[in-house]
Image (cartoon, rainbow, N blue to C red):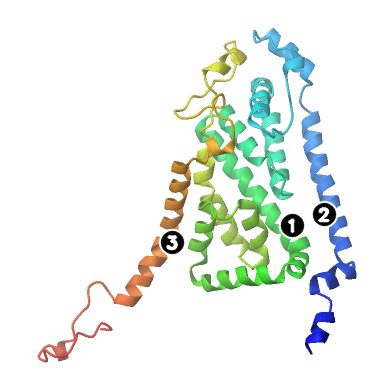
């Protein structure tokens, strides 16, 4: 029997040899190209960098086209360079820029591509804090939703076949918290224990309802969003905004883009501790109910029939 089990191919290799996954790869490739086409079409509606520089010069904010940069930032140096270009676009074509940032954010989140956090920081430096928080909440929730749906419709069977034991472990953990799933989902969203992409991918596989997922995402992302939009433009960027019709530069206490060098500057020990504390608050109602279930009601009512018998304990069920 042991020799037969050793010779039996692993389920993962059986799935790969079945070639069923080829259809999934083709579907994902088509979806990726479609999303990329949407982002590219929105980018094409923006003025060229040369036209942007000419418009900025006519408004009293001279900028050389060679110094302007437009790309998904991969580092904080690139982010600072892109921010100056986006500030000029924001002054001239704010609606088209907002549409491009939203589409790019959703595209990056949907296909688990790095760069969404950079867009959050850029939005925080361009918009008023309330507008930035609303914008980031909307696009991050939408990106998580499209990623959830893509995994449920295209990748669920593939991931279950490739990683059965890990998925069974996480599924058992979710089932253990099924009675208070919303609190558990909020805890996972807020605390930095699991990366956001893992929660997006795992949630449809372990059958977390879409409604619970969306609410937990929209609410649970708020602490992270507040942290990312704290990286605002400092006074050093004021030269990019000359002219009365230039957008207002927002200031905020704390680190600015000019003094930040990596995401570690955002997720300091203090911020991580804050996220953990908020995550524990999400589980607090469950913990209170559990303690009350063990100890009984906080104000037990004694049994009148047992009032004359000092050896009997009050009946908590009445």
Q: Residue furthest front?
A: 3
User: How far apart are the two marked residues, 3 and 1, measured between alpha carbons?
Assistant: 29 Å
Q: Quadrant of residue 214?
A: bottom right
In this orientation, which residue lies closer to the viewer: 234 or 149? Answer: 234
Q: Earlier in the sequence, mark 1 or mark 2?
A: 2
Residue 292 horizontal/vertical position (percent):
32, 72
Q: What numbered label is drawn on residue 28?
A: 2
Q: Is residue 49 above or below residue 21?
A: above
Residue found 68% across the figure and 28% down from its top: 78
Residue found 12% across the figure and 88% down from its top: 307
Q: Which residue is mark 3?
A: 283
Q: Which residue is mark 1?
A: 150
Q: What numbered label is drawn on residue 62?
A: none
Q: Earlier in the sequence, mark 3 or mark 2?
A: 2
Residue 179 horizontal/vertical position (percent):
49, 72
Helix, strand or loop for disc 1 = helix
Residues at discs 1 and 2 in contact (Cβ within 8 Å): yes
């Amino acid at each position: 029997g042991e020799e037969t089990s050793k010779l039996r191919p692993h389920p993962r290799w059986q799935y790969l040899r079945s070639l069923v996954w080829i259809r999934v790869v083709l579907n994902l490739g088509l979806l990726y190209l479609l999303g990329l086409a949407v982002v590219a079409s929105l980018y094409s509606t923006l003025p060229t960098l040369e036209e942007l520089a000419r418009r900025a010069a006519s408004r009293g904010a001279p900028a050389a086209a060679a110094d302007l940069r437009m790309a998904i930032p991969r580092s904080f140096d690139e982010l600072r360079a892109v921010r100056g270009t986006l500030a000029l676009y924001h002054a001239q074509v704010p609606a088209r820029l907002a549409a491009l940032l939203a589409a790019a954010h959703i595209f990056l989140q949907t296909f688990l591509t790095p760069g969404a956090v950079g867009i959050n920081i850029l939005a925080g430096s361009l918009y008023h804090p309330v507008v930035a928080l609303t914008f980031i909440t909307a696009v991050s929730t939408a990106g998580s939703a499209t990623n959830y749906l893509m995994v449920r419709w295209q990748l669920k069977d593939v991931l279950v076949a490739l990683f059965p034991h890990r998925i069974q472990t996480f599924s058992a953990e979710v089932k253990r918290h099924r009675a208070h799933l919303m609190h558990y989902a909020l805890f996972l969203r807020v605390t930095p224990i699991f990366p956001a992409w893992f929660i997006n991918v795992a949630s449809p596989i372990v059958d977390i309802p879409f409604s619970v997922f969306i609410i937990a995402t929209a609410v649970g992302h708020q602490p992270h969003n507040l942290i990312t939009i704290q990286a605002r433009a400092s006074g050093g960027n004021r030269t990019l905004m000359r002219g009365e019709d230039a957008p207002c530069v927002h200031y905020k206490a704390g680190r600015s883009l000019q003094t930040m060098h990596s995401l570690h500057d955002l997720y300091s020990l203090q911020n991580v501790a804050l996220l953990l504390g908020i995550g524990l608050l999400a589980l607090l109602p469950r913990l209170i109910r559990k303690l009350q279930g063990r100890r009984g009601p906080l104000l037990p009512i004694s049994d009148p029939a047992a009032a004359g018998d000092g050896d009997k304990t009050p009946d908590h069920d009445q």
